[in-house]
Image (cartoon, rainbow, N blue to C red):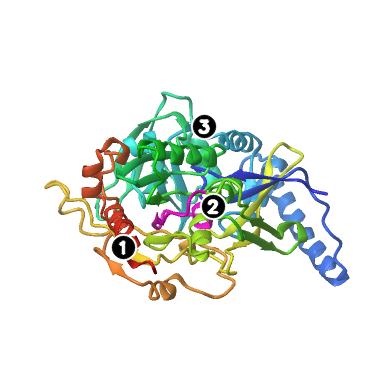
Amino acid sequence: MVSWITLIFVACLGSSLIVLSSGSSAVAADDDDNSYEKIFDELKVFTDVLSIVERDYVREVHGDELVQGAIKGMLTALDPHSGYLEPEFYQDLRIQTKGEFGGLGIEITIRDGLLVVVAPMEGSPAEQAGILPGDKIVKIEGNFTKEFSLVDAVKRLRGPKGSPIEISVLREGYDDLIDVTIVRDRISVKSVRYRLLDAGFGYVRVSQFVESTADDLQDALYALVKENDSDELRGLVLDLRNNPGGLLTQAVRVTDLFLDQGVIVYTDGRVQEQKQKFFAQKRGTQAHYPIIILVNEGSASASEIVSGALQDHGRAIILGTQTFGKGSVQTITPLANGGALTLTTALYYTKNGRSIQATGVTPDIIHTVDSPPATESKKENSKKSPIRLREGDLPGAIANPDGRRSAEEGEQASEEEGDAASSSPPAPALERPQDLSTPVLLERDSQLRRALELLKTYERFQPE
């Protein structure tokens, strides 16, 4: 029996839910002899090519180098989240689940052969250097990144704490490359931040799902009650914007805080081990105050599980813009050489049987935000809105099994507000929301302001 441990596929690779296999599983025999014969014929072609390259290529290459390259190419042909993890990188990945790791604190993906920033992490060197979602990393230390794999890019971006690295980014609306020097640091993920917005109304920001997130969220909710003179909250804003996801177990535990029964999420794949259901428990459930969840195109994976589950249960109102649409699960299988195979093995579904893959979660209330005012020097270069990168935009992305498209679902939202031409963050990139006073934050963040207004009027529209 294979044991399963949930892992995060964080920051520098992209948003994923991952399951770690304790070892390689035997491949089941195929009853179709003709199929095997065809595979062996193709393998003969592969060995012929391998021999020719080893013999005739302009420089000497080792067989293991060629085989690893072939493995990478095979997995790249499947979908954006399947891949080969080299031994050193795999060990780093396992450390990252603790919520502390070295690097720039930047989440990237690949689109049209280019490295694209999904989101910088809050408080990270990348955020402080002004890196924005949608930036295309064209050069790393003067080397063009065209056709870099994610693993190749991550290896180049990492380095000792305190060491500088120069990257060149192409930003929508700018004619020239922007050169940015970033000093690497030890990234420690503080996944939960909170404050009282007004008497009885709490705000909790979850930036990523790491091992401590559910416990930290529970502590934050208790602290908000204490700060509210020990009175129960009248409403809560749960901010999951630009949350790239993380641990599946933490997404389940966070959701369980607000539900007392029913299915939270289930996964479905080709083999029995990939068919799992996660249920809410009554013990530890929070008081039944109204909840509004803020999401945007940077909300992915685990954050989509939370928002989709609470939406299906009618426990929360979702406000914002369409989410990223990362609805697949990756299984990591360790390999004999110390590396690992990460393979897409299942899709996850909400209580109502809804797959979020390539579509995302459609908010109950669509509310975009206004762009921050441009400075005089940037007005000419800021005419275009930022790139809205989502799962369905990635080459080879798995289609939604129900054939749904996010644009079609977006038409069903109950309300549309704000400036539909932009999804920029409400505050300048270098001014972090946690550094702002509550009045200033509400003034600058139209989505948060709208959520608080809805919470304050929520009771008026409830049946007697």
| Residue toward you, 82 or 2 | 2
Sequence order check, earlier mark of 2 and 1: 2
Q: Is residue 361 left or right of residue 450?
A: right
User: Could you tell me if residue 166 is visible in this image?
Assistant: no
Q: Is residue 404 left or right of residue 415?
A: right
Q: Amino acid at mark 2?
A: Thr
Quarter-of-image position of residue 439:
top left
Q: Amino acid at mark 1?
A: His
Residue under label 2, please give it: 255
Q: Is residue 84 left or right of residue 457?
A: right
| Residue toward you, 167 or 452 | 452
Residue under label 1, please give it: 367
Sequence order check, earlier mark of 3 and 1: 3
Q: Which callout, 3 or 1, points to the residue nearer the camera?
A: 1
Q: Residues within 10 Å of mark 1 (few under 14, many from 20)?
A: many
Specify start and end residues of the magenta stretch as a single range.
286-305
> Residue sitting at 46 percent across and 57 percent down?
111
